[in-house]
Amino acid sequence: MRQIEAGKIKKAVAELVLKANYALPVFIRRALKSAYIRETNKRAKKILKAIIDNAAIARNEKLAICQDTGLPVVFVEIGQEAHITGGSLTNAINQGIGQGYRQGHLRNSIVRDPLLRGKPGFVPAVIHTEITAGDKIKLTVLPKGFGCENKSQVKMFKPTASISEIKKFIIEVVKNAGSDACPPFIVGVGIGGTQDYACLLAKKALLKIVRGHRSRVTGHMGKLARELLREISRLNIGPMGLGGKTTCLGVNIETYPTHIAGLPVAVNISCHALRSAAKII
């Protein structure tokens, strides 16, 4: 049994908060640059250049990429041979979130009571925990902005639903997001499980590498992702909703077995500033 101090988790989370909010993942930067090269609409190209420049300034100057520094979502993969000492996992994560947000002068956006609202703070984070093999802990911080989170949807299809019906729903969700969710988008899709688990799958899909038009994922899900990307691109929403062919940088799909009587499909949209950072302890 490996002993891991809670303070080590707190420190790691604080570092990940800053890294995620300051620097876009390499695969997102590459996707944006590739989109800039392919884009033919002059205004769209100019907006993509501004997005790319903004990301570079944020990374170099250690500034928040976006003023909405999101609701921090933390994915924890904890090995069954790991034992946390000196405090609880939840407290360590939330303390790390608070430390990172204060240190980075990042916006406090979390209200304790969803109905009464009140003065915003930095915590609590939304924490998803998964037990894995081994004695290590993997922490992934995803600061999720709500301009795009508000546009996410889930639908319980009948098990007889066709792939074309599912595609129509996903495309309609993206279309309704329009300019409000700050395109170009990354679209996470979760198919299967229960209603709540499909939503989690859709969010986890945002953590996968975005390969866009270069994706060579095989099988029917890979085919579906490529078809969705092509059809979403034809919506002509464009960067920041002002037209152009760069409406979506990539579509990622996560699946899970489901009940014979159901077919849950969830869509989680991310803006172009898909921020995440991970570390293994």
Image (cartoon, helix red, strand yellow):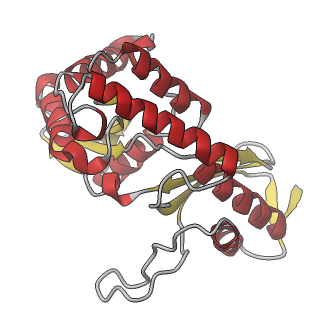
- Up-down: is 176 above or below 104? above
The image quadrant that residue 187 belongs to is: top left
Residue 100 versus residue 222: which sits nearer the camera?
Answer: 100
Is 222 left or right of 16, judged from the image as shown?
left
| Residue 254 can be seen, yes or no | no
Looking at the image, residue 215 lies above or below residue 26 = above
Q: Is residue 105 left or right of residue 273?
A: right
The number of numbered badges drawn on the structure is 0
Q: Residue at x 39, y 89 (%)?
A: 118
Q: Nearer the viewer, residue 93 or 179?
A: 179
Q: Quadrant of the N terminus?
A: bottom right
Residue 2 horizontal side relative to residue 122, left or right: right
Q: Is residue 98 visible?
A: yes
| Residue 168 % position (x, y) | 12, 31
Residue at 53% across / 46% down in the picture?
Answer: 275
Q: Residue 2 occupies which quadrant of the picture?
A: bottom right
Residue 23 at x, y = what percent? 62, 44
Q: Residue at x 45, y 38 (%)?
A: 51
